[in-house]
Image (cartoon, helix red, strand yellow):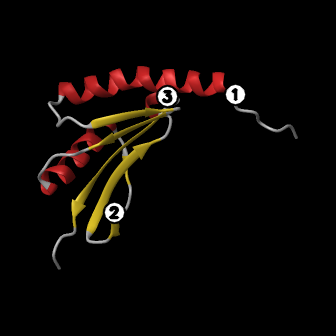
């Protein structure tokens, strides 16, 4: 068995693929007039974070982006009075890029 060596060239190629996929992601969101997310481009991963001031709107934005991009919702994660909602897809639309969206929302009262 040979060891897999990842080079800087590999990482740059993956990052370029993620950058190109971002255009498709933004177009899909624009077509549906979705709320703007803050996007980070890593090597082969796009991460969209919803920073709307209203926490209910944040959750709704993650749900809307998840639906439009066909992302899989993760179970909510609770920590210190906040809930992190997120969704993702590996190899989004066959582009070799993972797409994730998420937001921190206030914990809902019991």
Q: Nearer the viewer, residue 66 or 22?
A: 22
Secondary structure, mark 3, is: helix
Kindly report the distance in space between the C-alpha atoms of the residues bearing marks 1 and 2. Answer: 35 Å
Q: In x, y percent, where is residue 27?
A: 26, 22
Categorize mark 3 by other alpha carbons within 10 Å: few (<14), some (14-19), many (20+).
Answer: few
Secondary structure, mark 1, is: loop
Residue holding disc 1? 7
Categorize mark 2 by other alpha carbons within 10 Å: few (<14), some (14-19), many (20+).
Answer: few
Question: What's the residue at 24%, 45% (across, down)?
Answer: 50
Kindly report the distance in space between the C-alpha atoms of the residues bearing marks 3 and 1. Answer: 22 Å
Q: Nearer the viewer, residue 8 or 57?
A: 8
Question: What's the residue at 17%, 37% (across, down)?
Answer: 35
Residue holding disc 2? 76
Q: Is residue 39 left or right of residue 17?
A: left
Q: Earlier in the sequence, mark 3 or mark 1?
A: 1
Residue holding disc 3? 94
Kindly report the distance in space between the C-alpha atoms of the residues bearing marks 2 and 3. Answer: 26 Å
| Vertical relation: 106 (above or below) 10 | below
| Vertical relation: 20 (above or below) 39 | above
| Vertical relation: 95 (above or below) 82 | above
Q: Is residue 97 left or right of residue 75?
A: right
| Vertical relation: 93 (above or below) 78 | above
């Amino acid at each position: 068995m040979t060891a897999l060596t990842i080079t800087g060239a590999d990482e740059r190629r993956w990052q370029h693929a993620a950058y190109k996929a971002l255009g498709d992601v933004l177009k899909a969101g624009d077509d549906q007039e979705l709320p703007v997310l803050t996007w980070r481009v890593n090597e082969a991963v796009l991460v969209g974070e919803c920073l709307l001031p209203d926490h209910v709107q944040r959750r709704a934005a993650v749900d809307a982006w998840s639906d439009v991009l066909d992302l899989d919702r993760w179970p909510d994660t609770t920590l210190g009075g906040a809930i992190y909602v997120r969704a993702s897809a590996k190899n989004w639309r066959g582009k070799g890029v993972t797409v994730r969206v998420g937001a921190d929302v206030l914990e809902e009262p019991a």
